[in-house]
Image: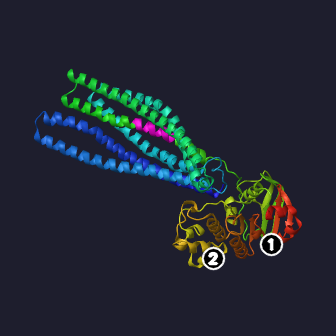
Amino acid sequence: MGAGELSGRDVLTRSVKGQIRRVALGSALGCVHQLGEALVPVLIGVVIDQAVAGQDAGRLALWLGVLALMYVTLSWSFRLGAKAGERGAEEAAHTLRLAIVGRVLDARGGAEDGRLPGELANVATEDAKRVGAVNMALMSGIWAVAGVAVSAVALLLISVTLGLIVLLGTPVLLWLGHLLSKPLERRSEAEQDRAAHASGVAADLVAGLRVLKGLGAQQAAVERYRRTSRISLAATLRSARAESWQTGLVLALTGGFIALIALVGGRLALNGSLTLGQLVSAVGLALFLLGPLETFAWVNAELAQGRASAARVAEVLATGHSVVDGDESVAEPVRGELRLRGVRLGGLDGVDLDLRAGQLTGIAVTDPAGAEALLRCLGRETDPESGSVELDGVPLTRLDPTGLRAAVLVAAHDAALFEGSLAANVTPQEEPAGDRLLTERAMAAARADEVAESLPYGPATGVGEGGRSLSGGQRQRVLLARALRAGASVLVVHDPTTAVDTVTEARIAEGLREFRQGRTTIVVTNSPALLAVTDHVILLDAGRVGAEGTHAELVRTDATYRTAVLA
């Protein structure tokens, strides 16, 4: 069991007891409120029979005082109950967001497979919010049940006939409301699916905005999003229509039910079975029942939408992992020796590699697919289809993924910068004063210090979402500085200088070699400047090791290497 799963499960477990207490407290306060609401028309009937009809000023003052006290109780019980309900809903949504993010960030991966980032964001926001709202719906449903029960008892005391109508009619109304919510549940699920897909497409297009502008493909991108958005809009409208039909029909049934109670109460008053005060109380209770019965309709709709969103949240949380779990800790200290034996995956065809500890090794490729597959194996994003990868003689499949990620850092060339300052992107956490020198050295090695000097506020300058305020070369230097500053025992970098000029690239190559002196570093690139500073170079050709040696030797003796690196 990995740390990501444990933390997510712990978050959910710790939240459950608090949620139960909050639901219980909110339900109790809501029931007090409903009890008071139901007793108001009863008290008004008593006032009419005992004070108004008898013209007793003293009794009138007494009962008006009781009513005033009742309304104070109603006010405070509603406020405190609603507060508990809203807090329960928001905390439940917050807990789900933490669990979803924990699953997405789990070192074993898998949650992001087949899903656009925008889809996951939609699940973690809108779906989590809808599932959290079930807490409020549950409490509201309990309040409504309490209101109907108190009203039924009061009506039974006034008239057995009216009480039986409420007791027998309410379950029928609830059952009909549940049946009417089924289409809403189906269409709500479709709506959220389409909305999540639209969000994913939008995020994808925004992330590639510069590329789209460079290709002149803005119009095609707009048309793509317009089609996706139209489909999402149609699903939303279908869901809204289902909700309006469900609400309208339930309200019509509720109105008919209330009319039946008023009609029976009126007939009982005409034949003398009820006093004037009792009739007023019966009609008042019938009108009060509109609230709880309308609440049932709202609760049905919320539960229908909550069930649809809960299914989407559960799908993400239950997604299988990309790699199997390991239970061994990474041995300390990490020497950093990596070994691949018969590795087959993607563009790799039975690769055997020995990457020596403490060396700067360059890996050139004739097929980019081979580079991508190698990076996935070394970062353990995917396990090989066959063969094994070892760190210091231990297969990666036996190591805890979280500990492995701390020991082996794979810095992809297309990694993202975060919203915030340049400094925060290089060092995301607060660092002690003694560590600032290390940060400065990492910045200098990657020549990111020059980027900081060119910005209005130096390292404190914001880089924008995804680093869009920086050029491609500037982003690459900041990303390399971040990878160097992490201080991993084994660092794997992929094409870290493709967007910088040749002079800067040569200086970065020297800075990289100096900064990582004595620690295992692997550079997957076809850049001559970077390969020239490595201790050893390996050429992957057609998924296999084609040649090994120093950069100078391979340039002189291997035509395939010359073509791959110098062409």
- Foreground disc of the pair 2, 1: 1
- The amino acid on which the numbered mark 2 sits, given as a three-letter code, is Leu
What percent of the width, then of the height, locates residue 512? 71, 73
Please give the label number shown on residue 60.
none
Residue at image mark 1: 535
Screen quadrant of the N terminus: bottom right
Task: State the SS at label 1.
Answer: loop
- The amino acid on which the numbered mark 1 sits, given as a three-letter code, is Asp
**Residue 359 drawn above or below residue 340:** below
How far apart in space, not on screen, are marks 2 and 1 (Cα)?
Answer: 24 Å
What percent of the width, then of the height, locates residue 514? 72, 76
What percent of the width, then of the height, locates residue 404? 70, 62
| Disc 1 crowd, CA 10 A, few/some/many (<14, 14-19, 20+) | some
Whether the magenta-drawn stretch holds residue 88 is answered as no
Please give the label number shown on residue 438.
2
Taking 544 as reference, is 48 left or right?
A: left
What percent of the width, then of the height, locates residue 166? 34, 29
Earlier in the chain: of badge 2 and badge 1, it is 2
Depth order, front residue of 425/554: 554
Instruction: Specify the segment rendered in magenta.
Output: 296-307
Task: State the SS at label 2.
Answer: helix
**Residue 204 drawn above or below residue 296:** below
